[in-house]
Amino acid sequence: MDEILRLVERLKAGPVGPRGRTPLKEFGLISCDNSVHIRLIPFYEPCIIVILSGRKQIFDTPGTMTCEAGTTIAVPAPSYFSMRNEIDPHGHYYKALLIPFRDGDLERLRQAHKIEPVARQQEVGILKFEHDATLVEAIKHYLSSNGDPHLRDHRLLEILLILAKKNPRLLSYAFSGESWSRRVRTLLSTDIAHAWEIGEVCKRLGTSESALRRHLKGEKTGFREVLVDLRLGTALTLLLQTSLPVYRIAYDCGYQSVPRFTSNFHKRFGLPPKELRATVNETEKKLDVRGHSSVA
């Protein structure tokens, strides 16, 4: 794990952009000085989380799932999980690497290696993997792609192939499919601070307001719920992975009132944004995640 952490630290080094972030978008690193519990974290795309130090507890599974350092988990999407990141009592911090991927990556993997389709399984949930030398080397290769997107994508498939061989149920993540809430979320993500109205969204998606409301109701959600959830999920990522001040994050996520943002965030995740920010190392706040509103 130390080798992976040193690689990440090297990649982070460099000039910081005007928004307090480095240009890295292929992965995220979460580092906490104190244990933190976050309620119902949204995962809009599947991801791999590598626990480097400390311990993660996940509560929205059958029983509590405990993941020690040296464990990798795969998280399906769309999904929501409550998680507690606990610091290492000896090293005094929690660190985890997050590698996002898309369900289409799994289909590319299956076709490239002529893997038979797996039976569609409901409620696959989070999958847990113990580390071995092959997996660790694959993660190191991915981190050493030197900014080459083609090489990075190839090495991402290498990681996914290793995990799929350990547990073929991973391929079931490819069945998330297209949904109306996903289509709406993708559009809203293009400008999260914009004052979106359902009429404008319907026009962009080529559907009527009544049809969109009906589709979203069938998915047990609504337009306003999707917008608020996406804004708060994006704020969660920015709090953990940038050095932007809370007021700027609130405005960038479409809130004109910081107190209102603070209140909504607290209700949604179970703690106020300043308390969450206080758990994160100042030196670790400057990584970005490729379109991912989640915390490793």
Image: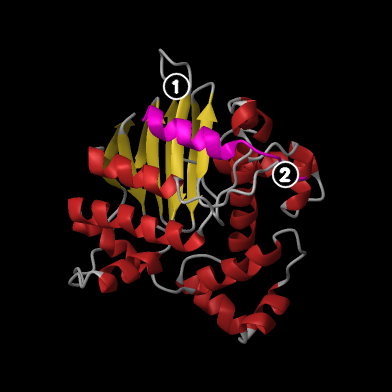
> Dot 2 corresponds to which residue?
261
* Residue closer to the observer: 14 or 295: 14
In the rendered structure, find residue 87 and report the number of the disc placed on it: 1
Residue 244 in sight from this viewpoint:
yes
> Which of the 4 image quarters holds residue 247?
top right
Residue 266 in sight from this viewpoint:
no
Q: Look at the image and give the residue range highlighted in magenta.
A: 1-18
Q: Dominant secondary structure of the magenta stretch?
A: helix
* Residue 173 locus on image (x, y percent): 32, 62
Residue 192 horizontal side relative to residue 35, left or right: right
Say which amino acid is labelled 2.
Phe
Say which amino acid is labelled 1.
Ile
* Residue 215 locus on image (x, y percent): 51, 77
Which residue occupies 58% across, 26% down?
279
- How was this image coloured? secondary structure
* Residue closer to the observer: 3 or 264: 3
